[in-house]
Amino acid sequence: MQKKYVMISNDIRNKILEGVYSANDQLPFEKDLCVLYDASKMTVKKALDILVTEGLIIKRRGSGTFVKDIGPEESKRLIMANQFRGTTASNPDKKITSEVLEFSVIKAPEEVCKQLNVEADCFVYDIYRLRYMDGEPFVIERIYMPIDVILSLKEKHIMESIYEYIEEDLSLSIQSAHRTVSIRKATEFETEKLKMNPGDPVGIAEQVGYLNTGITFEYSISVHHYNKFAVQLVLTRD
Amino acid sequence: MQKKYVMISNDIRNKILEGVYSANDQLPFEKDLCVLYDASKMTVKKALDILVTEGLIIKRRGSGTFVKDIGPEESKRLIMANQFRGTTASNPDKKITSEVLEFSVIKAPEEVCKQLNVEADCFVYDIYRLRYMDGEPFVIERIYMPIDVILSLKEKHIMESIYEYIEEDLSLSIQSAHRTVSIRKATEFETEKLKMNPGDPVGIAEQVGYLNTGITFEYSISVHHYNKFAVQLVLTRD
DNA sequence: AAGTGGTCTAGACCACATT
DNA sequence: ATGTGGTCTAGACCACTTC
């Protein structure tokens, strides 16, 4: 890899997190950063734009670039929020385990066909699992994947990390996902499985995942325990 | 608009929405788009990157650029999701009204000081309002803004659009916001005000807003009716 | 091997803020 | 008037797929 703009943004991000550049400080000017990193203006700008997107810095034309005044915990959460990883990879310090409630191959129902963009009589895996974080149940997932795209999926992969299997064993590249988050009251089944109380709410994440080839490989609906669920966003204008 | 890359991305977005480029179609190559729009490669790439971020297209090095296979409704929602606007501006087809529950100036409580990054004895507006969309209550907002930053705020602005007042009357530029979304059960008060049933859940959006000067101008907590609440996200790797 | 998108440059000019 | 960041260019070279 060694992309220069990634290296520069990593370096500046670290300096912010370590306090070399602290809250409300002005960063060196772009032209000085060009000299410091031996890079062109466009490259430095691209590096800084990553940090703007992460919400760590703010740029003011005519004035300069400044470190946003947010706490270190929020900084880390924002950096995390801009990454797209599976549950296992996102929580390296937690033990993620799964109980498989269902694992079969079915003809894709209408809604699944539509979301996955496959033919009406196409076969898909029907995966239904309850996931635990450090032994506590936190999400119930229903996942559909075309059997032609994700080959040879076995129960052992379902019990561990499907994303890891896709990327490491199948050598496919996951590129992006469209996710819609909403809320509703838990069903009786969900209440029991997630060890909640009657009437408690759940967070719903409906997601369509794409490979870097543009192929849709996943349609999933995740039902989250309400107090183990949060979404971080950085919103910008432009 | 004067920015070339915005013009190009707008043009291509429109062509996608109008079906000139339809689902799974390959877009013209970057070099052809350079000729078509009389622009350099970097400019065309920047224009396309906007559409990638919006989730409308996908790029494959070595192959080309393709239109993602999503329905027109989802396309529109994704485009909306990437913009940061106030409720009034985001819903031009709806009538947004507000019932003011509280409007006063107070010494900022500790949590508010921290979030707004102001001195401990700083005065802030304490705004508490219930908002209606086409006559139906959908969100209860508690907003804190430093009186030194948002000058001369009056009840009539609270009843209409605060963002409009900030941008049009005060001529300030809102730049970005950090938002955290979570879920909990509604309180009795919220249940009544939002016309929900006992035990229903609510969506919580906690937000810190920044002006383009880097100054924090808003700390707010919004409590949303559960079935009038959804968040759209496009997640990417890189 | 040819052709795609990705990175990077060196420099021009523009828009905006401060002096 | 100076200096900031923002946009744009023309072209070089690299990484990847198979046009």
Image (cartoon, coloured by chain):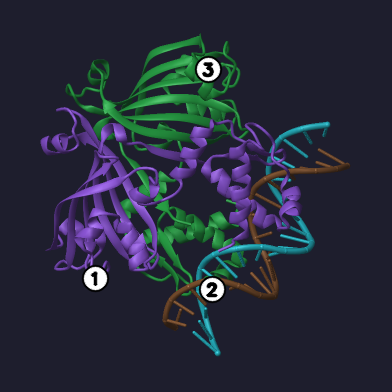
Chain colours: A purple, B green, C cyan, D brown
- Disc 2 crowd rating (10 Å Cα; few below 14, some 14-19, many 20+) is some
Relative image position of residue A43 (x, y in whole percent) = 65, 57
Q: Secondary structure at mark 2?
A: helix
Which residue corresponds to mark 3?
Answer: B153
Q: Are marks 1 and 2 in contact (CB under 8 Å)?
A: no
Q: Which numbered disc covers residue A148?
A: 1
Relative image position of residue A155 (x, y in whole percent) = 19, 59
Say above or below: A14 vs B182.
Answer: below
Discs 1/2, front: 1
> Does residue B76 appear in this view?
no
Say above or below: A49 vs B156.
Answer: below
Determine the CA span between mark 1 and mark 2: 34 Å
Quick check: do tags 3 and 1 share a chain? Answer: no
Say above or below: B235 vs B184.
Answer: below
Which residue corresponds to mark 2?
Answer: B32
Determine the CA span between mark 3 and mark 2: 52 Å
Residue name at image x 44 percent, y 46 percent: B82
Quadrant of the image occupied by residue B7: bottom right
Residue name at image x 45 percent, y 44 percent: A80
Say above or below: A19 vs A217.
Answer: above
- Disc 1 crowd rating (10 Å Cα; few below 14, some 14-19, many 20+) is few
Front in this rendered view, residue D19 or B163: D19
